[in-house]
Image (spheres, rainbow, N blue to C red):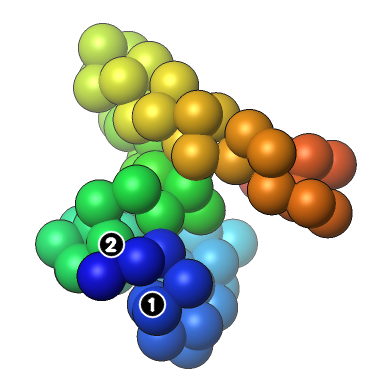
Amino acid sequence: MAADMTDPTQHLAALAHLKADRLAEVAAVCTSILSVSPNDWLALRMLGSVRTRERDFDDAARLLTAASRGRTGQAGLDHAPVQR
């Protein structure tokens, strides 16, 4: 299934968890998204952020690299804000 077929409420839920620093919940939602849409750049990016915070830098690098590949060429998404 294509990334654009993912229920957008899942992304919103993951973002809310990320803002509230609920890392386990972010990971669970993003894992669910990726089980359906393995190239979903936003889920990859959020999960990469979680792995960075957990100091799992190898997995974080893998996820963030995949996210950046998924974003390439998507109009309007090249300047999306980075969650810090």
Helix, strand, or loop for circle 1? loop
Q: 72 or 21: nearer the eye?
A: 72
Q: Is residue 31 left or right of residue 11?
A: left
Q: Please state which amino acid type lies under the numbered disc 1.
A: Thr
Tell me what residue is drawn at x 47 percent, y 72 percent.
4
Residue that appears at 60% across and 40% down: 71
- Say how many tags the image has: 2
Which of the labelled discs sits on residue 76, or is there none? Answer: none
Query: Which residue occupies the extreme left position in the image?
Result: 35
Residue found at x 83% / y 54%? 76
Above/below status of 58 relative to 51 = above
Residue at which label 1 appears = 6
Q: Position of residue 80 (x, y in %)?
A: 78, 48
42 lies above or below 50: below
Q: Are marks 1 and 2 in contact (CB under 8 Å)?
A: yes
Q: Quadrant of the N terminus?
A: bottom left
Q: Residue furthest top?
A: 58
Q: Position of residue 19 (x, y in %)?
A: 59, 62
For badge 2, the amino acid type reads: Ser
Check disc 2 and report the residue beneath it. 37
Q: 69 or 13, which is in the foreground?
A: 69
